[in-house]
Image (cartoon, rainbow, N blue to C red):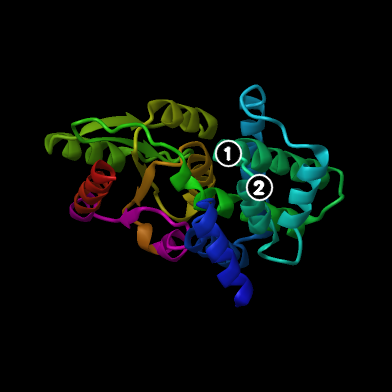
Amino acid sequence: MSGNNNLAKRGRAHDALHFDVYARSKTNISRLKARLPDEIVANLAREVIRRVASKASEVENVVAVPSQNTLEKLSEALISNDELAGANQILELRSVGQSAEAIYLSHLAAAARLLGEWWEEDRIDFNKVTLGTGRIFSIMRGMRHLFEATPITQHKTALFASTPGEDHTLGVRMAADLFRKDGWDITLKVGLDHDALVAEIEQSNIRIIGLSIGGEHSIEALMKLVVALTINCPHASIFVSGQNIESVQSILDLMELSGTGSDIVSAKKQLNDLWDQHATA
């Protein structure tokens, strides 16, 4: 308990990590892992590694690359039995003057890439890599406040998309039309594969994303999409809707979405509230 209190105090002192966000995310990830098949958990870990590690390549000429010793120390902390070790490493980096960009885009990105290499080389097992990627993902969630968001437009805008692999897109098309009648500027994306959809959403800089899911058969694709968008579009609010959403609601509740709904009335209210939150942030 004292360890938690010390971490929270240090996080506030250095403004490096929202501890409550980090702790909540870590807890929810553990609960999801307990409920999901190992294959899905492994695929989500691979998505975290791929998305986070790609940041290292993007910024190699922008921020300083950490030393091999620093990188290995962070990676070992992220998979250690001490659940606070990785977060403590991040706070230490901030306390000695490392910028948020260097930590988020270089240290964590390089650590994710190294964990992926260790996994491929059988130096760490499934449990270790999913533990480490879960902690990286939670730390990134806890650092979102440190990055400046793009200004929002004067009029309400959102991007609606069907989850990759969904054949039934009538619902999301109808929702887009109904929101447009209410004055929203809606960008609609249907029929795109995972990577194409993530790329288009990232380039759009839109702050509210509405995703449509048809039921339990799409939950893995949805979770993979939410992971990618959380990493690539940290300031976006993600709302999930669908007629059969009740069948997966308990899983959605652990994904830390900005909202869920099964009817247009609820969706309109929640998205209007989300827009107001962004407008006043």
The residue that disc 2 covers is 93
Residue 151 is left or right of residue 254, and the answer is left
Q: Is mark 2 on a helix, strand or loop?
A: helix
Q: Does the magenta stretch include residue 260?
A: yes
Quadrant assignment for the N terminus: bottom right
User: Measured from the top left, where is residue 19 in percent x and y?
Assistant: 52, 61
Tags 2 and 1 touching, CB below 8 Å: no
Q: Is residue 9 magenta?
A: no
The residue that disc 1 covers is 99
Dot 1 amino acid type: Ser
Tell me what residue is drawn at x 61 percent, y 76 percent.
2
Residue 214 is left or right of residue 73, and the answer is left
Quadrant assignment for the C terminus: top left
Say whether disc 2 or disc 1 marks the residue closer to the N-terminus.
2
Tell me what residue is drawn at x 22 percent, y 46 percent.
276
- Considering depth in this image, is 148 or 224 the residue closer to the camera? 148
